[in-house]
């Protein structure tokens, strides 16, 4: 990726993320080939909808070629239709579970998408439903299975099925933190925040989501989990950036600082928020931390741009010739891919680096 393509992509991403037309546009205009590469990067990071919103804020003389722009418009239409499909599936599931007295919360996805200026252009994936009680978890699984839907067992005791062509996952674990010595503190935190749920409306139903604090802890630890593995894309960081500006007041920021320190994640969170401020344009006043660090954020950005969403686009470890149009790659070369991440994080979150591979090995052996 050339410096021009990288700068143009990040500029458009920040413009779309914040609907800010005041960015430095000196990198424009781009050549047709450069525009094609910007689109490839946006797709690899699953932020093509956000970048498109940035394009719409450009002066018209800087727009991409007409053919590429039409291709982008078609992609946005596909994203919006997929989000409508996700919303409809969630609506039906919510009504069905409520009628049976089953309580759940929606994690990530559409819930975080509602923090965007235009939620419909955020690329959606699946539906992750969290059940605080084992009883509700099993009731939900049984109810789905009773409708003739095949429910499969997934990682970490989750359940997975297809509903109206949407992949749905049921979870009993909300937070991806693997250090066993902080699980008691996590349990206390979840109890404290249980009565502070947020919600959003789909038609005539209210969909419950975690509190501001728990949404932060969940989304941020989820990013860390994937970065310790094959990698993570910019969409997940954008989600946390948009969530951050919904902060009710400084008390939540103070609570987040205390929680991350207690969970052994303080240095990772300082790095992540430095990244959000310096690379994605999060206004400093919405970061729990006042200071930023440039060097580590540059390393993080370089790796994210290489690996793409969840490591599916990283071609650094593929053998033979690779065409740019080959978007997806098998996540092979496991040791070579994961070890650099763990080494980088060793000084930042040593406890998680130690316990993460042990937890993965344990769950694999015992199929939990």
Image (tube, grey):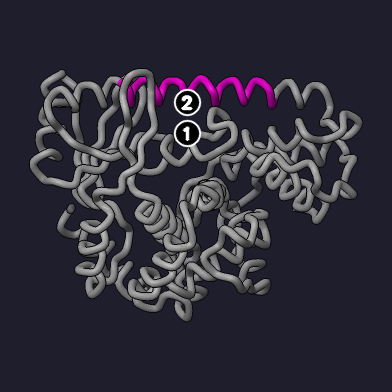
In-image side of 124 versus 186 (left or right): right
Q: Residue at x 72, y 37 (%)?
A: 54
Going from N to C along the chain, the mark reached first, 2 or 1, is 2
Q: Residue at x 45, y 78 (%)?
A: 346
The segment highlighted magenta reads 72-91
Residue 25 — which label?
A: none
Disc 1 marks which residue?
124
Q: Quadrant of residue 354?
A: bottom left
Classify mark 1: residues with Cα within 10 Å, few (<14), some (14-19) or many (20+).
many
Q: Quadrant of residue 69?
A: top right
Q: Disc 2, disc 1: CB below 8 Å?
A: yes
In front of the other: 202 or 153: 202
Disc 2 marks which residue?
83
In front of the other: 328 or 10: 10
Placement of 186 over or under 139, stated as above or below: below
Q: Residue at x 21, y 57 (%)?
A: 191
The reply to whether residue 309 is in sight is no
| Magenta-colored stretch includes residue 75 | yes
In-image side of 16 versus 311 (left or right): right
């Amino acid at each position: 990726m050339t410096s021009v393509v990288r700068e143009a992509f990040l500029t458009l991403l920040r413009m779309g993320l914040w609907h800010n037309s005041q960015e430095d546009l000196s990198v424009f205009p781009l050549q047709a080939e450069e525009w094609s590469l910007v689109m490839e990067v946006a797709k690899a990071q699953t932020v093509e909808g956000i970048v498109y919103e940035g394009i719409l804020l450009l002066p018209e003389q800087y727009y991409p070629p007409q053919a590429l722009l039409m291709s982008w418009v078609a992609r946005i239409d596909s994203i919006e239709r997929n989000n409508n499909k996700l919303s409809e599936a969630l609506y039906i599931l919510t009504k069905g579970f409520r009628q049976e007295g089953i309580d759940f919360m929606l994690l990530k996805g559409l819930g975080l998408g509602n923090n965007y200026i235009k939620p419909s252009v955020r690329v959606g994936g699946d539906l992750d439903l969290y059940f605080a009680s084992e009883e509700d978890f099993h009731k939900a699984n049984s109810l789905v299975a009773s409708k003739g839907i095949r429910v499969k067992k997934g990682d970490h005791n989750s359940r997975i099925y297809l509903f109206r062509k949407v992949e749905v996952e049921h979870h009993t674990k909300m937070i991806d933190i693997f250090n066993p010595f902080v699980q008691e503190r996590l349990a206390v935190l979840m109890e404290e925040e249980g009565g502070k749920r947020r919600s959003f409306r789909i038609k005539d139903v209210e969909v419950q989501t975690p509190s501001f604090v728990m949404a932060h802890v969940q989304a941020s630890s989820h990013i860390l989990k994937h970065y310790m593995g094959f990698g993570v894309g910019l969409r997940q960081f954008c989600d946390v950036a948009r969530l951050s500006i919904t902060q009710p007041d400084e008390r939540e920021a103070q609570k987040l600082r205390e929680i991350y320190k207690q969970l052994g994640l303080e240095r990772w969170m300082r790095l992540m928020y430095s990244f959000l401020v310096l690379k994605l344009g999060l206004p400093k006043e919405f970061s729990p931390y006042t200071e930023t660090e440039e060097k580590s954020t540059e390393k993080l950005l370089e790796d994210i741009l290489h690996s793409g969403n969840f490591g599916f686009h990283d071609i650094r470890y593929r053998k033979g010739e690779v065409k740019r149009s080959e978007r997806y790659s098998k996540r092979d070369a496991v040791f070579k891919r994961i070890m650099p991440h763990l080494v980088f994080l060793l000084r930042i979150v040593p406890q998680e680096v130690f316990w993460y591979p042990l937890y993965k090995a344990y769950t694999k052996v015992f199929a939990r």
